[in-house]
Amino acid sequence: RRAMASLWMLLVCANAAAALLVCLYLWLIAWPRWKRETRARLKVADDATVVAFFHPFCASGGGGERVLWKMVHTLAQLHREKKRRLHVVIFAQKGPKTPEQILAGAEERFGIDVSTGGGSGGGGGGSMKIDFVFIETELIDLLHAETWPRFTMIGQSYGSMVVAWRGFQTATPDLYFDTTGAAFTLPLGKLCGARCAAYVHYPTISTDMLAMVYSRRPSYNHDSAIASSKVSKEKAQGPEEPSIPSH
């Protein structure tokens, strides 16, 4: 038993040491190099701050995009008024639309003219440059609930980290904003040395989800096999029903 316990302790220590070495490599070597490469590749001005947004579906015309474009518009105004020199990067799904078409769609859909504060490209004069990092569809698929028939939320959270990782590799920012509720991308942003913030429309786990699990109602993100499982049934037959506040 002592030999087994010692072996397990050795394995735990070895894994912890390996994880620490990986984090130190990323923090001290990889991320700084990627940040320098980002500024060179995107031709970021020496005194400009790179601000990245995680919003893969920014070209779909959904209501949640309004927050993104309003934030970009505000940053463009700050840049134009010379209060802060900025360079915006958006992590987006690769698709048929060009950056110009995406920005034009934001103006048409929400009445927010991002180009009035800058526009994509340029960077001269008072304009703020806006670049897009287009993520491959194969990685974006990891964000869809249909990809994960079991453990959906865990799978989607993992997918968001993979997508964000690809974005950080391509464009390592100084400031990082999550505007989709992908909370697990924030530690990656922090690890790469960026200051992080988020606008959250809804929590990762809502009271509606808890109520669905308690009542064992199947849904697109609550498979019928899980909803009707023995474990779920035993939980649902607990001594007291939890109080679920109404929205």
Image (cartoon, rainbow, N blue to C red):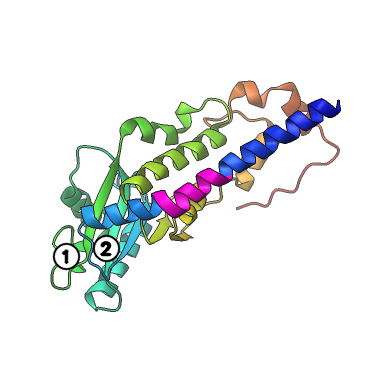
Q: Amino acid at mark 2?
A: His
Using the image, tell me which numbered label, if any, was put on residue 123: 1
Q: Secondary structure at mark 2?
A: strand
Using the image, tell me which numbered label, if any, was put on residue 230: none
Q: Quadrant of residue 241?
A: top right
Q: Position of residue 118 (x, y in %)?
A: 19, 66
Q: Position of residue 114 (x, y in %)?
A: 23, 62
Q: Magenta stretch: residue 23 in it? A: yes
Q: Is residue 151 at least partly visible in the picture?
A: yes
**Labelled pair 1, 2 in contact (Cβ < 8 Å):** yes
Q: Amino acid at mark 1?
A: Gly
Image-based side of 123 in relation to 222, left or right: left
Q: Observer-nearest residue: 189 or 225?
A: 189
Q: Which residue is mark 2?
A: 87
Residues rendered magenta in the picture = 20-30
**What secondary structure is the magenta-colored segment mainly?**
helix
Q: How many numbered discs?
A: 2
Q: Observer-nearest residue: 59 or 24?
A: 24
Q: Residues within 10 Å of mark 2 (few under 14, many from 20)?
A: many
Q: Relative to 146, does residue 54 appear above or below in the rendering?
A: below
Q: Position of residue 174 (x, y in %)?
A: 38, 61
